[in-house]
Amino acid sequence: MAGVPQLQKRLVDYTASLFHEGVLDEQFNQLQLLQDDSNPNFVVEVVSLFFEDSERLLNDLTKTLNQQDVDFNKVGANVHQLKGSSSSIGAQRVQRVCIAFRNYGEEQNIEGCLKSLQLVKHEYAIVKNKLETLFKLEQQILAAGGIIPRS
């Protein structure tokens, strides 16, 4: 098993790559700053709520867009919510795709909406996978008795 310094370096490098790839933005750092000893699981809890909300919204969007008469107001409301929650945790690429998605919804462009839905699902899957990996690394460091390095 890797020692604490190696795990900490992996975490720092991995986190840096998430920013470099544009998966996360500065808002994620802001979220981390709100975490302290009185609330050590703050980031994991906020991100877990983001995952739950996003999956519900993506399911709603899928159902709504597959109906004969698409309710574009509902699409717009769901995309707006998804954009807001992804923005609040710093999921930059999800947020960006939502902006295009919202425009297609306003134009009532069903093809554009369906393409955007696939893109949002894709970007969401990436950010979910990467954040879960990040949290696992943090858990390994804590389990090994180390502290989480914050940049």
Image (cartoon, grey):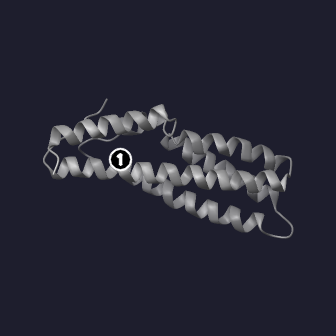
Frontmost residue, 20 versus 47? 20
Q: Residue at x 39, y 53 (%)?
A: 132
Q: In front here: 30 or 21?
A: 21
Local SS, label 1: helix
Residue 125 in the figure: left or right of residue 67: left
Q: Quadrant of the C terminus?
A: top left
Residue 39 in view here = no
Q: Which residue is farthest top?
A: 151
Residue type of the residue flagged with mark 1: Leu
Residue 15: image location, x then y, percent: 37, 37
* Relative image position of residue 5 (x, y in whole percent): 17, 37
Residue plotted at (14% across, 49% down): 144
Give the left or right position of residue 111, taking residue 17 as reference.
right
The picture quadrant where one finds residue 94 is top right
Q: Which residue is mark 1?
A: 134
Q: Is residue 121 visible?
A: yes
